[in-house]
Image (cartoon, coloured by chain):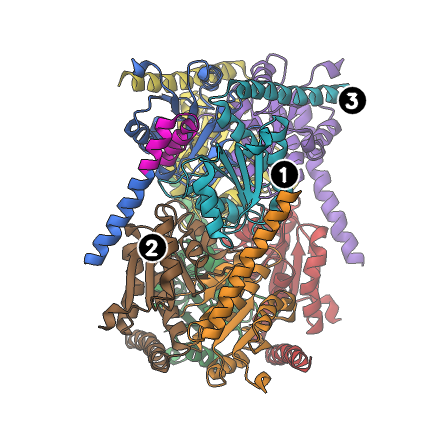
Chain colours: A green, B red, C yellow, D purple, E blue, F cyan, G brown, H orange
Amino acid sequence: MAKKKPVVSIIMGSDSDLPCMEKACEILKSFAIEYEVKILSAHRTPEDAAIFAKNARKKGIKVIIAGAGGAAHLAGVVASFTTLPVIGVPMESKALKGLDSLLSIVQMPSGIPVATVAIGEAGAKNAGILALQIIGVSDKKISEKLEKFKKDLANSVRKKNNSLKNV
Amino acid sequence: MAKKKPVVSIIMGSDSDLPCMEKACEILKSFAIEYEVKILSAHRTPEDAAIFAKNARKKGIKVIIAGAGGAAHLAGVVASFTTLPVIGVPMESKALKGLDSLLSIVQMPSGIPVATVAIGEAGAKNAGILALQIIGVSDKKISEKLEKFKKDLANSVRKKNNSLKNV
Amino acid sequence: MAKKKPVVSIIMGSDSDLPCMEKACEILKSFAIEYEVKILSAHRTPEDAAIFAKNARKKGIKVIIAGAGGAAHLAGVVASFTTLPVIGVPMESKALKGLDSLLSIVQMPSGIPVATVAIGEAGAKNAGILALQIIGVSDKKISEKLEKFKKDLANSVRKKNNSLKNV
Amino acid sequence: MAKKKPVVSIIMGSDSDLPCMEKACEILKSFAIEYEVKILSAHRTPEDAAIFAKNARKKGIKVIIAGAGGAAHLAGVVASFTTLPVIGVPMESKALKGLDSLLSIVQMPSGIPVATVAIGEAGAKNAGILALQIIGVSDKKISEKLEKFKKDLANSVRKKNNSLKNV
Amino acid sequence: MAKKKPVVSIIMGSDSDLPCMEKACEILKSFAIEYEVKILSAHRTPEDAAIFAKNARKKGIKVIIAGAGGAAHLAGVVASFTTLPVIGVPMESKALKGLDSLLSIVQMPSGIPVATVAIGEAGAKNAGILALQIIGVSDKKISEKLEKFKKDLANSVRKKNNSLKNV
Amino acid sequence: MAKKKPVVSIIMGSDSDLPCMEKACEILKSFAIEYEVKILSAHRTPEDAAIFAKNARKKGIKVIIAGAGGAAHLAGVVASFTTLPVIGVPMESKALKGLDSLLSIVQMPSGIPVATVAIGEAGAKNAGILALQIIGVSDKKISEKLEKFKKDLANSVRKKNNSLKNV
Amino acid sequence: MAKKKPVVSIIMGSDSDLPCMEKACEILKSFAIEYEVKILSAHRTPEDAAIFAKNARKKGIKVIIAGAGGAAHLAGVVASFTTLPVIGVPMESKALKGLDSLLSIVQMPSGIPVATVAIGEAGAKNAGILALQIIGVSDKKISEKLEKFKKDLANSVRKKNNSLKNV
Amino acid sequence: MAKKKPVVSIIMGSDSDLPCMEKACEILKSFAIEYEVKILSAHRTPEDAAIFAKNARKKGIKVIIAGAGGAAHLAGVVASFTTLPVIGVPMESKALKGLDSLLSIVQMPSGIPVATVAIGEAGAKNAGILALQIIGVSDKKISEKLEKFKKDLANSVRKKNNSLKNV
């Protein structure tokens, strides 16, 4: 079954991040890309996270999406154990509204990048799209679907613009 | 000639960004990946930027790296015209030290991601590495080289650690 | 019909910005200035935005008001295609409360200004007033109406002050 | 003499702001627009600032550019006494690097807009260009010169891009 | 009547600031200090604000408390027209939560101080206490009452602490 | 000797704050107000600070000026032991440029105000002026001198403005 | 009774901090560590705080946990009177969401450290755990319990991860 | 040899952090506490960091001090593998001056605390003192030395204060 071979891993530090990270799942699903979802904590299950990261490429994973909040180390920790592209999604944290999550994810030292997207749901959805763009570099079917997605996006804006005129 | 077929475009809004963005060039060069460097301004040459972005995939480009500062729109503008992965490098701006550049690049709306890396030179170098990771998803030679690069990185840290002990 | 010839364009990246941007519409309406409202996304319909901006002056537009949030590129992108004054209204974004929108709009590079106003509704209303002030530079009727508006504003404050005394 | 009739006033709170604000002077001079330069402090000469603002339109001024730093009140104070468009330039302050200046200028309450531009020299230059755009709304010669200025700007970027290729 | 001779003026830019500024009124009332409350806008009634400030000392006012939000200029504008001590209370603004108000009030240029207190209600109450402390410099009755107030404050904390132990 | 009876105490956490705090000394000296200067640390000599604060009023002190940086507790600690007005001057700290000092001083809880001025030298000078304004509430000679000081301030701005015209 | 000899003191500036600080109590209780809870204000009961801190070690206290918000001086003030380790918990303040609390606690000057944890409830719980870790340095039973706690933490993450798979 | 048995580990992500972290070494040395210094990167040598942390207690380490900058994960990563107290020192980073380092270290999720100190050298020195305080919980010699250190600190402030008076 295709289902047995996910190509994208969506991981997060806590199940409270799930509602946000589902935006990434949805977009991958709509492109019929197989993905897996895991709760892995950089701080509470560091060894599981390390094992996951070290084995991801062998298992057929092409892109990892990691959501985390506060002192958000998950994306960076996973990136330290793999050479796959790792996309970091900063969660909107309670007190500092995700500014802490963003800086903890994006300000990685030279040598170990994390591809950081916007704070919260827009970022989670965009993480899914970025994963598709990465896959689309060598997969023409996906890149063509992305072109169509882009056109649909434009058309939905145009439709809203037109409905405005009619009012 | 290989030189005729760059697979990574490194673009920036101003030639003052060049010293920083050269960190991306250097890492690509060290992996023998062909790249092109362009000065394209989202604000001063918006049409050139649009034309560049629309044609990038056709020309064989696989990843675009865009450096910009302040109200840093270049990465987002280019991403709006292509479905290639676009990596954004926030320049360290004069007054706000790159916080403006970072937020202008990373907080993209749902639908159009930009893979954002750290402010300044560490970010520029990591943009190059991230481009290699993206290419490495479907290019085993590159992904293997990345594994070696990672090991060298670890060894250089270990060497520094050891020289510390000897003191 | 006057309605056929708007002199102010009010554009925004998403229909979710409409409730805020209506503050700009209301003030223009109260001055009997014709305006048009458009949903145009710097990221989702970049070409529509470019075409709009390039043709605005020819169509009789004198001032463009652009509302956008997050990595708010709309005002800057439109400003890159026109020499009309462009007023940028930073939307109050969900996580960072408009600080991202503000910096993305105001920190424009040398050569391409955007006249930035306050975050959210106060800014949207002020964008309308600023458009009237710009038109009023060469339109005595409008500048005289603005003087009256300013006096009314003062009087409404005085009325509140007086009602305070009576309590 | 044309010199007797400035159409733009460039004011600032302190002579230490002059090196920055000269960027506004230079661009106006290059467009042969008459301007005056004044040191007027919202806090040290508030009455002079008020008298200046109340008389500006009568004297033939069309746009006011105000530079100030820290708790930067000059632009707002002047705007409270005139219905001319007022452009605010946030100075780069010593401790907070202009973030204080920016927020003090841009976050004006509903009713009294200030057209805010970027912190520091890029903002000062852009204030001059924005003044020209405002004048250009009803002055075809200026708007045509602005089109040429925009093309020159694009060409200077292109020249830099080409010189890059030749290296 | 004592009521005819207020010694503290509590002014604010808008009647929406009243619920917050009432904390200053309450503390003054509890010390039997006469005060007046005024709505005066630095931006909408600048001349009223100037006249108020210039006449305050003559009228017998000893301390001015000014509450304002956003680009909060009221305290600074009033301070520019008087040599009385002016206490500034930063309102909690909608988008930026009072950080803009705070910086606009506290970062005054050399020559014109504003005695700034905390954002919001704690600040408003403290503005009242600070006014009492200033009056208490030369009014022994007030300074003695302040000593008692301080003791009561301590005792209320101690009472809470004790009730904790009993639980 | 008058020198034996200072009415203002200028205290600071470290001798490295002295160059900044001297701005407060200078202005007091120019008004012939006796002051004392002390190094007192909220953290290193907390008991000395407490004893100082508890005895200040008895010794004839009318206003306390406290400069401190980082987690700047000195002003708040002193304010907790006295009912004299305490003016806090946030030092420009090394990493965070005084934002930490400012927030640590200004955000005092309800009950214990600190009159906070700007970060750094402008704040130190303004602390001195604010102390004079507080003394001037009941000392006509000082309040008249302050009026003259204010006029001189205005005249020095006017002189600069005039010298500009002559250029 | 063991209850007579607490080894951890949990103090806070106000009873409104109690719901947050209870997270520290709970974790200590679950490890059967005796603790005391006190309301002590750096600003309202500074002498009580000083006496508490000076006597803590003698009474058998090993670690002090202090929660405070805004210009949060409690942890620093207590640390200035003891050589016991002091853990500071920044409360989430109303306007600035705990950024003020955090900087006021963590940016202590050289000589007097405060061990700062995260803003709000996560920080309060972690303060309890950190106290246990400190006690565990010389108390094998506690350090072994901490190892078990760490494993349970990991297992609860794994359980959530597994339940995800089953969905 | 005592040298063979360090009780404090001082680790850092890069040798560029060494000049700052030496402040921690110096204070430990002055207390005759054995320590070791290691360069260990959370991102470049994650496995070395994990192995170090897992073995630290067994080797006799009582406290770990970790310095890191930017997306500073080292302290958190080490804390995830040990139940020893981990002290985090935020390095002053180039662009964001350590605000990123601070938030990445202090905002740890519930379960895994890091005892965070100030940004930069003051923090490094305080990390050393905090380590001593932790050791001093069960080591009377150290806690007594700390009392003396505290007195010396106070005396050095008093000496500075006195030399001021003599001037």
Q: Where B125 sits versus E109, above or below?
A: below
Q: Which chain is disc 1 placed on?
A: F
Discs 1 and 3 share one subunit: yes
Name the front one of labels 1 and 3. Answer: 1
- For disc 1, the marked residue is F22
Instruction: Give me the residue at 33% from left, 79% from top.
Output: G145
**Camera-nearest residue between F72 and D128:** F72
Q: Where D129 sits versus G97, above or below?
A: above
Of all residues shown, which one is farthest toward the left? E167
**Camera-nearest residue between D101 and B51:** D101
Discs 1 and 2 share one subunit: no
Secondary element under disc 3, as helix, strand or loop, is: loop
Q: C126 left or right of D42?
A: left
- For disc 2, the marked residue is G12
Question: Which residues are the magenta region?
Answer: E124-149
Per the image, is F33 magenta?
Answer: no
Discs 2 and 3 share one subunit: no
Q: Which chain is disc 2 placed on?
A: G
Q: CA distance from mark 1 to mark 3?
A: 35 Å
